[in-house]
């Protein structure tokens, strides 16, 4: 059995974060959470992660700024942007800045899980190559 995929879930909506953490953990993922971009960067500094699920719209440091900083400090971490309908253009800009992909909130659990697996597969292939 391979090691669990390490996921950092970053969103300012605490109830959403709690629910999603439980659901992803049940699927065998190792999940840490942060409620802000600043907290996410602090966690990443101390904990190796594979995939970051990043909300686009947060108070303080928004998802785009957080994405930029994550990619500067941790280029091999894959980032999946989570966005509401009004922010699709921002999520697409995020992909231009190095995000792996984006999903609309609330994301279907299966879609989210498979997207995380795809992002992790990209990392493992890059590590081998």
Image: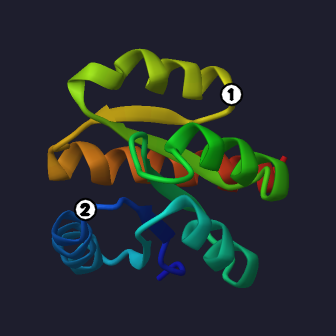
Q: Residue furthest front?
A: 60
Q: CA–CA distance between discs 2 and 1?
A: 24 Å
Residue, disc 2:
13
| 37, above or below 112, in the image | below
Percent of width and height locating residue 99: 59, 36
Number of marks present in the image shown: 2
Q: Nearer the viewer, mark 2 or mark 1?
A: 2
Residue in the image at 26% along x and 68% along y: 17
Residue 111 vs 22, above or below: the answer is above
Residue 117, position in %: x, y?
Answer: 43, 53
Marker disc for residue 97: 1
The quarter of the picture where residue 40 lies is: bottom right
From the top left corner, tell me how far across and down residue 87 is, in percent. 35, 24
Q: Residue at x 47, y 43 (%)?
A: 80
Q: What residue is at 62 percent from the left and 78 percent from the top?
A: 43
Give coordinates of residue 47: x percent, y percent: 67, 82
**Which label number is shown at residue 105?**
none
Looking at the picture, tell me which residue is in the foreground, 6 or 99: 99
Q: Which residue is painted at 22% across and 23% down in the image?
A: 85
| Helix, strand or loop under label 1 | loop
Judged left or right of residue 96, residue 83 is: left
Rendering quarter of residue 25? bottom left
Mark 1 burial class by Cα count in 10 Å: few <14, some 14-19, many 20+: few
């Amino acid at each position: 059995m391979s090691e669990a995929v390490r996921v950092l879930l970053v969103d300012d909506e605490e109830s959403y974060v709690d629910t999603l953490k439980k659901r992803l953990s049940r699927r065998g993922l190792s999940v840490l959470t942060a409620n802000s971009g600043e907290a996410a960067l602090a966690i990443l500094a101390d904990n190796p992660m594979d995939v970051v699920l990043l909300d686009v719209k947060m108070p303080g440091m928004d998802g785009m700024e957080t994405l930029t900083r994550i990619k500067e400090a941790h280029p091999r971490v894959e980032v999946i942007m989570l966005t509401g309908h009004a922010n699709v253009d921002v999520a697409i800009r995020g992909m231009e800045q190095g995000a792996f992909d984006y999903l609309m909130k609330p994301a279907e659990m299966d879609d989210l899980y498979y997207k995380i697996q795809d992002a992790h597969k990209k990392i493992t292939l890059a590590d081998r190559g």
